[in-house]
């Protein structure tokens, strides 16, 4: 009892949404204390040894703007760890931010993972967190965490469908009685939409842009369904023919065409999940609809497109960007729920 009191005094339990695009950290009793890009800037010396120069927002600012010796790297790809060493260093940074650099005792952590990843990938996440200073690491699948964060009645014997559109993956899951009845995961998300915009502008206008510019275009004028008002945006890049900087104007219709292919993959994943859902649970989904979370859920008119394609009610969660980490944070506050939904 005395040890538990001492532990809580000097450490805060953490929930971490370790995403391909962004990492969010929730501290028990405080809420979300960090929400930064999952990017690490490293410098290589003549022997190839890497030194971390920046993490998070500061590192993302360097994407596409670094000299040869400095490289901005995303250590996660398609929702799983691609670079173990940099993931560990990135986690250390976020844990230090969460503890305001004053922690004495190693924190306990709940970390979100994509549904259906391999045991090897799970072990990589757990070992990265432990090496970064966490102890008693619990893993929770993102669709479950998102459902808790979106306030779905997952304890009840009824079907709840949630679609989590992240940076690297899109997860479609049907949840009932604290369990995932069916899930479909596709390695398509916001990053693939950014790549599609880069490819489209290269092919259509002979203009080369970076991924940060593509992401900004997607956020400002991206749309999944035709709109009455066509919006435009000035885009700067390099002319592939003349080799000099150039500015063009793109429309929301053109960007909708650019991202159509990855959007269609997400639509097909939802259709497939609906086909595989048991009839009784499918009937519940007809009444309740489908809940969208994740950064991709904020693409303009995506809910309208999905409503047209499925004929079902489509609802965007109140806090789509933070639903996963908020759900993980609630698990921290409920030991019984922690045991039931984590591994």
Image (spheres, rainbow, N blue to C red):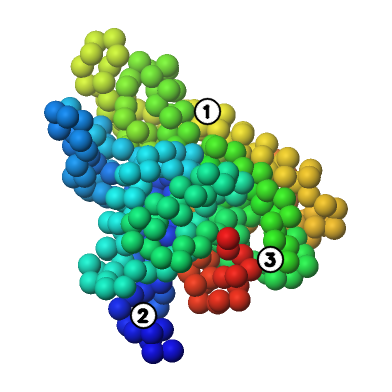
| Residue for badge 1 | 257
Which residue: 27% across, 73% down?
104
Whole-percent x, y for residue 30 in the image? 37, 75
- Pick out the residue farthest to the left: 46
Answer with left or right where residue 326 lies relative to residue 119. Answer: left
- Pick out the residue farthest to the top: 241
Q: Quadrant of residue 268?
A: top right
- Closer to the eye: label 2 or 3: 2
Secondary element under disc 3, as helix, strand or loop, is loop
Whole-percent x, y for residue 300 in the image? 51, 45
Tell whether label 3 touches label 2 (CB within 8 Å): no
Which residue: 52% across, 59% down?
139
Secondary element under disc 1, as helix, strand or loop, is helix
Q: Could you classify mark 3 by the number of other residues whose Cα lies within 10 Å: few (under 14), some (14-19), or many (20 or more)? A: some
| Residue for badge 3 | 178
- Pick out the residue farthest to the bottom: 2
Q: Quadrant of residue 241?
A: top left
Separation (CA) of disc 1 from disc 3: 39 Å
Which residue: 61% across, 34% down?
265
| Residue for badge 2 | 7
Q: Quadrant of residue 150?
A: bottom right
Answer with left or right where residue 118 lies relative to residue 175. Answer: left
Separation (CA) of disc 2 from disc 3: 30 Å
Which residue: 50% across, 56% down?
112
């Amino acid at each position: 009892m005395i040890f538990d009191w001492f532990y809580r005094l000097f450490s805060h339990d953490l929930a971490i949404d370790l995403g391909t695009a962004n990492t969010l950290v929730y501290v028990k009793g405080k809420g979300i204390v960090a929400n930064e890009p999952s990017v690490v800037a490293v410098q290589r010396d003549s022997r190839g040894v890497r030194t971390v120069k920046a993490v998070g927002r500061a590192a993302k600012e360097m994407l596409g703007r670094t000299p040869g010796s400095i490289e901005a790297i995303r250590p996660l790809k398609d929702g799983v760890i691609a670079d173990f060493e940099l993931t560990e260093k990135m986690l250390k940074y976020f844990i230090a931010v969460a503890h305001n650099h004053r922690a004495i005792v190693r924190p306990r952590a709940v970390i979100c993972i994509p549904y259906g990843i391999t045991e090897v990938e799970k072990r990589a996440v757990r070992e990265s967190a432990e090496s970064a200073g966490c102890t008693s690491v619990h893993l929770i699948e993102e669709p479950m965490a998102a459902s808790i964060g979106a306030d779905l009645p997952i304890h009840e014997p009824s079907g709840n469908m949630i679609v989590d559109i992240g940076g690297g993956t899109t997860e479609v899951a049907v949840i009932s009685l604290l369990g995932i009845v069916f899930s479909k995961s596709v390695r398509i998300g916001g990053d693939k939409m950014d790549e599609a915009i880069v490819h489209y502008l290269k092919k259509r206008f002979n203009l080369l842009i970076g991924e940060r510019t593509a992401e900004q275009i997607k956020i400002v004028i991206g749309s999944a369904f035709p709109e009455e008002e066509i919006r435009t945006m000035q885009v700067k890049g390099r002319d592939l023919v003349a080799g000099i900087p150039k500015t063009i104007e793109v429309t929301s219709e053109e960007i909708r065409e650019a991202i159509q292919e990855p959007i269609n993959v997400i639509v097909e994943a939802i259709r497939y999940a609906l086909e595989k859902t048991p009839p009784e649970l499918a009937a519940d989904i007809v009444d309740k609809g489908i809940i969208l979370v994740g950064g991709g859920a904020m693409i303009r008119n995506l809910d309208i497109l999905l409503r047209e394609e499925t004929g079902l009610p489509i609802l965007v969660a109140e806090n789509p960007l933070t639903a996963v980490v908020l759900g993980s944070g609630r698990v921290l506050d409920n030991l019984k729920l922690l045991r039931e939904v984590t591994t």
